[in-house]
Image (cartoon, helix red, strand yellow):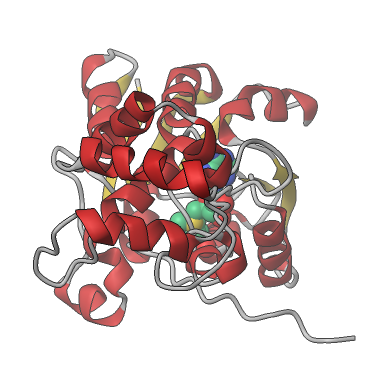
Amino acid sequence: MSAPREPRHAPVLVAEVLQLLDPHAGQTWVDCTIGAAGHSRLIAERLSGSGSLIGLDQDPTMLELARARLADVTGTKITLVHANFDQLVDVLENQGIREVDGVLADLGFASDQVDKAARGLSFRDDGPLDMRLDPTGGATAADMVNTMSEAGLADVFYEFGEERHSRRVARKIVERRATKPFATTSELAAVVRSCVPRSGSIDPATRVFQALRIAVNDELGALDRLLAALPRIVKQGGRVGIISFHSLEDRRVKQAFRDSPTWEPITKKPVEASDEELARNPRSRSAKLRVATRT
Ligand SMILES: C[S@@+](CC[C@H](N)C(=O)[O-])C[C@H]1O[C@@H](n2cnc3c(N)ncnc32)[C@H](O)[C@@H]1O
């Protein structure tokens, strides 16, 4: 039997998460985005002594990595569930759990997913134009770029990618797909690069790829539904930590924690990576952690 694959993903803001969320023995926690269990392993160790950890991920391949990384944790009951975190209320109900002491969500994708060309998340490698974080169902990025209206595509690129050339890109896509539908990441990246000027070292395809990934996975809709459900799930005095990677997400988390009497923000400003972490893990560059207590 082959040894379990080592995860590539390095968790961000680990010390800050543990310090601000302060999970401890006997508590029940949810990791909404367990990924390769970098955070969850450390949380599970803190819960040891009849504590419970429920880990969700919409990607079954990440759950496999998490299972391997958590295999030798003792003293904490660990339950891994293949689910979108917008289904958290139902997931907990199925486990017979009404309330939890804390929730962590580390949004977006793991390095293991983006580095795998077959997932179609990266414009750097050629792969099928897929982008689904849950590969078991739903429309792919190819379905979207081959069927959406020109105006619809322009809206997606502008709204989710803040792409200034959204209309031009949408027009080019519609022109090109009339002769040959898009099938691969390289085909799409080439069209975007042909009509978006390069600025500095950032690839011109970056914003369009981000926008499509957000749309394919309904990332902002799922976050809104999670934020709306959390007050029903977290015990009084319990804690929630959310790590976001772009302003569209951070704005939602900030508003949810600030505008509702349900939450007392622990972080007035989002916590960001230290210089030492930035040097070690470039992915931490855009990470922002906000933590709140349930009043
Ligand atoms: C940044 S990674 C999490 C990494 C993890 N904290 C670690 O330390 O290994 C994000 C993970 O969340 C999953 N994910 C993203 N959106 C999700 C959603 N709406 N529901 C469930 N899982 C989601 C992705 O599939 C990915 O595995």
Q: Quadrant of the C terminus?
A: top left
Which residue is found at the position 42% from the left and 48% from the top? 176
- Work out whether residue 271 can be spotted: yes
Q: How many marks?
A: 0
Which residue extends farthest left? 200
Residue nearer the viewer, 211 or 101: 211
Which residue is found at the position 90% from the left and 86% from the top? 1
Q: Against 118, is 103 above or below?
A: above
Which residue extends farthest top? 261
Q: Against 66, is 124 above or below?
A: below
Q: Position of residue 159 (x, y in %)?
A: 26, 31
Q: Position of residue 256 (x, y in %)?
A: 30, 23
Which residue is found at the position 74% from the left and 45% from the top? 136
Residue 93 sits in which quadrant? Answer: top right
Q: Against 175, is 276 above or below?
A: below
Which residue extends farthest right? 1
Residue nearer the viewer, 133 or 76: 133
Q: Position of residue 52 (x, y in %)?
A: 67, 46
Residue 67 sits in which quadrant? Answer: bottom right
Residue 16 sits in which quadrant? Answer: bottom left
Left or right of 160? Residue 18 is right
Which residue extends farthest bottom? 2
Left or right of 293? Residue 285 is left
- Work out whether residue 32 can be spotted: no
Residue nearer the viewer, 164 or 78: 164
Residue nearer the viewer, 196 or 258: 196
